[in-house]
Image (cartoon, rainbow, N blue to C red):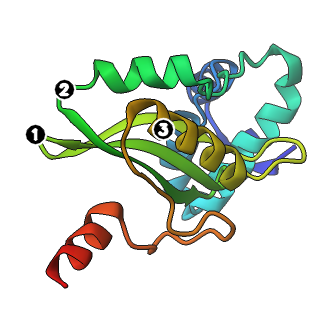
Amino acid sequence: MSGWWAYLDERTRQEVDADVLRDRRISAVRSAWEALRPLELGLHEAECVVHSRYEALGDQVQRTPPDPLDIPSLAGRATALSGRVAAVEALWDGDTVHDWFVVLVAVLDDPEGDGHLATVYHSEGSSPGAAAAAAGQALASRLGVPFHFASPDLPDGDAPRWRTVRRSAEAL
C-alpha cells in the first residue's frame, strides 16, 4: 500500500474510498492530490495512493462495464445524436490510468461536431484498435457512411481526422 495514505485525513480517506468503490478513479485521484499538495507531492503520488486503494478494496469495487460494441447498441447511440451522421471515426486517446485507448465517434453534419459512441480499452489479449476498427466498420456499413481510422495498428493521437482528410481530397 502507498505510504502516503497515512498522511490523508479521515474525511479524505472516506472520499477516496467512496470514489474507488464506485470506480471513479479520476475523482479519487483529485481528492488525494488536493490533500497531498500541501506536502508538495505530485499527481503521481496521488495516483499511487488510489491504485493501492483499488488493490486493497479489490472485489468490492463496482467496476464500470465497458461500452457496448454490438452494432444495434452503437446504431442506437448514433441515431439518438442531434445531427446527421456523416461518418464513423475511431481516434486514439490516452491517459495515465488507461494508457492508450480508442474512442469511436459519429462525425456529425448539421450541426457539425462529434458524438461519442464508445470508448474501447485494452482487454485481455485484444488490441483496442482491432476491436474499434471492427465495430466502427460494421456500424459505418450499417449506417451507409464512411469509416475512418487513420492509425488502427499504432497509437497516434495526432493522426489526421476524417474531416481533414476529406477536405484535403476535395481541394485537389
* Residue labelled with disc 1: 111
Whether residue 140 sits left or right of residue 47 in the image: it is left
Q: Tell me which label, 2 or 1, sits earlier in the chain.
A: 2
Check disc 2 and report its element: helix, strand or loop: loop
Above or below: residue 13 compared with residue 92: above
Whether residue 137 sits left or right of residue 126 in the image: it is left
The x and y percentages for residue 98 are: 67, 50
Does the residue at mark 3 contact the one at mark 2 (Cβ under 8 Å)?
Answer: no
| Distance from the alpha carbon under mark 3 to that under mark 2 | 20 Å
The x and y percentages for residue 50 are: 70, 40
Check disc 1 and report its element: helix, strand or loop: loop
* Residue labelled with disc 3: 141
- Please name the amino acid that badge 2 sits on: Ser
Above or below: residue 98 compared with residue 163: above
Does the residue at mark 1 contact the one at mark 3 (Cβ under 8 Å)?
Answer: no
- Please name the amino acid that badge 3 sits on: Ser
| Distance from the alpha carbon under mark 1 to that under mark 3 | 22 Å
User: How many residues crowd around disc 2 within 10 Å: few (fewer than 14), some, or many (20 or more)?
Assistant: some
- Please name the amino acid that badge 1 sits on: Pro
Q: Tell me which label, 1 or 3, sits earlier in the chain.
A: 1
Whether residue 166 sits left or right of residue 49 in the image: it is left
Q: Residue furthest left?
A: 110
The x and y percentages for residue 54 are: 78, 33
Q: Nearer the viewer, residue 163 or 143?
A: 143
Above or below: residue 139 compared with residue 157: above
Q: Tell me which label, 3 or 2, sits earlier in the chain.
A: 2
Residue displayed at 48% across by 43% down = 104
Residue displayed at 66% across by 71% down = 154
Check disc 3 and report its element: helix, strand or loop: helix
Circle number at residue 64: none
Q: Nearer the viewer, residue 114 or 149?
A: 149
* Residue labelled with disc 2: 82
